[in-house]
Amino acid sequence: MKTIGPAAIVSEIRDESGKVRTVCNFSTLQIDPRIASALRDAFDHVFGHNSVETRRQAWRCIRKFSLCIRKCNQHQSVPFSKDILRVFRDWLVEQNLKGATSQSHFNAVKSIVLWLSRNVTGIVSTDLIENVPSFPRDDLTKSVFLDEEIIKKILAAAYKEINEVSIRIEFGRRLLRGEYIDAREQELADLLTELLSLDVNRLFPTQQLILRTGRNLIARVQNAGGIRNLSKTLYLGPNDIFLFYLVIVVQCSGNPMAILSLKRDCLRFHPLRSDREFVVWSKPRAKREQKADFSNSRPHSAPNVIRSLLAQTEELVPFAVQADRKMLFLAYTNQGVRVPCFQLFHMMLAAFIERNNLPNFDFKQLRKSGGLLHHQAGGNILFAKERLGHVSTSTTRRYTEQNLFREQNDRLILKFQGEFVRTALQDTQIGDGEDGPADLCRKIAASIGPDRILLNTPVRSINVGDGHVDVEAKSTYGRYRAVLCAVPPPAVRKIQFSPPRSTSRERLLQALPMGRVIKIQVVYQRPYWRERGFSGQVMSNSYPLSYTIDNSPADGQRGVLAAFVCTSKAKQFMDARTDRRAIVAAAINQMFGCNFPAPEEVLVEDWAANEWIGGSYGAYFPPGVMTRMGELLREQEPPIYWCGAEYGQAHPCQIEGALDSGLRSARSIAAALAQG
Ligand SMILES: Cc1cc2nc3c(=O)[nH]c(=O)nc-3n(C[C@H](O)[C@H](O)[C@H](O)COP(=O)(O)OP(=O)(O)OC[C@H]3O[C@@H](n4cnc5c(N)ncnc54)[C@H](O)[C@@H]3O)c2cc1C
């Protein structure tokens, strides 16, 4: 009786034309079918939209994960232990891979595990531990940007090797055309011709076929350097294809995976200029065509390099595996004609770097560096955006601005902030705007006159009379011609108005709750993070700290990290019964991956607990409020005038917004008073 086995659990990786490029057979992973099937579903959902190469890479990561769970005996029962991510991390450490490689394997598997924890019950433990330390960075990832000189060196080395390859191929072709110049060349030409005639269904005979043919041929092949060497005279192998690939990645600054999928019809003429040509490729994740244009007059410009590659690989096409026939980077290998896998190119890159004595780099750095160089050369991020094929400059910024432009941007922002303050307070000596906000407050107070400022004196009521406004505050009272109400929206509602506030304003105030952020100043004896080369700025989506900033005083006498606990975590943090100081210190150590000495001071400010502020950073505008009631933020109701961060037309809910609205309202009051 014939037994029918269970259906295979597979996922097919198809290219955009629908052709199957790789079949990922989860049934071969030797794990419980339930786990295999869940992994397959997660793989399809998480990586289904990525390029063929990225999906292949993710499949390799899943295979590694299956080895790991088999080793730790978690492959036959579910759910996985709650520390499965940690287990996988430890397993990767044992494999002795590079830090960046381990991290990339880990990230792929983590997204799969997280998807499972959210979408499939019973596979992942409900108390999964997500927080797993990152892998230490190796030297490679430290230098993210390659400067122009290095890029030029990389290209020069690649062009030189490409020329050598082309000379080699042209030599072989010349021999086949019968254009030999001496007896040695003729002998080689005869040998090549004989080898090519052995099997018309193959490009080149296999070792076995030669062995079967006879001793004489074997000896001649050996004398000529062996079968592999001979095939190299006629066809480009993976090592040769790598050089073309490298040049095109550098010139296009394209996503390395997407560039590997370049098609043979990737060249397109420029619609307006005959001296320029486009290289066009697709990047599934971006869901749109990517392209870069080049001058076609330079011999090594990408279009010319591609044309040369097309010519040299033309005869490989009919012998390519079906799925690769339209691909540009076809290589002759022992197993047939195909596009080499990305992993292989990684290894070839390492060898290329070594033999050309270049600094260490990887393919991703080429893309980032290309973007940066275009940004620098064009003087505008739009040049980089165009070349990197991004929809928005905010993505490009991540590529180009991280290093070079960060400092420049910071200085620019400081300059404008300083100028803003100077404009807002023209009569005061406010300094150059680089002082902290507390100093700004002190200077504003000094310009008004300290005796005219009443601290700890909350206003209780505002009564509009005939030509005057009476203001009643704790322990004082005053009659004025106009009032500027500069308190946060929820605090306004604590003041009694007569006549009452208009219904529209009341509804606006009701609609604006304050956000919730807790600010913590963590004071250390020294800024220890600087000694490790860290800026002090960390962002995290784990509990409790969302981010930290180096807030140390300019004299460097103490190290101060400003840390923030945001939104729902703020409640959890303030409700915690444990020592908050210890929680904060431990969180910082974890974020920095260091063991800093205990902080001297941890100052916690919960702005929501301040009844006159009500929360932070400012009011939150739920959907619809701005569109339905936003107009009211600009309306004044003489003799009552409104201002505050929420009323700012530029940078609302920030200091600039507060200054902007304060300035406008002050001008309105001055104009009204001038008219009498
Ligand atoms: C932790 C934190 C970090 C921030 N970081 C930044 C940043 O990096 N950059 C940035 O631009 N902005 C930042 N902000 C926001 C910025 O501080 C505010 O937007 C800005 O200070 C608001 O200014 P304001 O004058 O409108 O209101 P506030 O500064 O809140 O001043 C309102 C004043 O009104 C007083 N008041 C309330 N009720 C009464 C009453 N009845 N009688 C008398 N006085 C009353 C309050 O006591 C308060 O002093 C941050 C805010 C917080 C909390």
Image: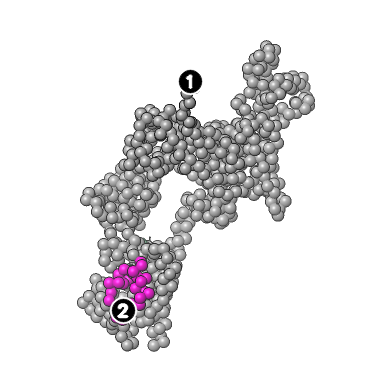
Q: Amino acid at mark 2?
A: Pro
Front-lying residue, 60 or 436: 60
Against 216, residue 604 (above or below) is below
User: Which region of the structure is painted magenta?
Assistant: 486-512
Secondary structure found at label 2: loop
Q: Position of residue 71 (x, y in %)?
A: 38, 28
Q: Residue 186's quadrant in the figure?
A: top right
Q: Which image quadrant: the C terminus? A: bottom left
In this view, the residue farthest toward the front is 1
**Residue sitting at x 21%, y 77%:** 475
Residue named by callout 1:
1
Q: Amino acid at mark 1?
A: Met
Q: Position of residue 624 (x, y in %)?
A: 42, 65
Residue named by callout 2:
500
Quadrant of the rendered image holding ligand 1: bottom left
In this view, the residue farthest toward the top is 215
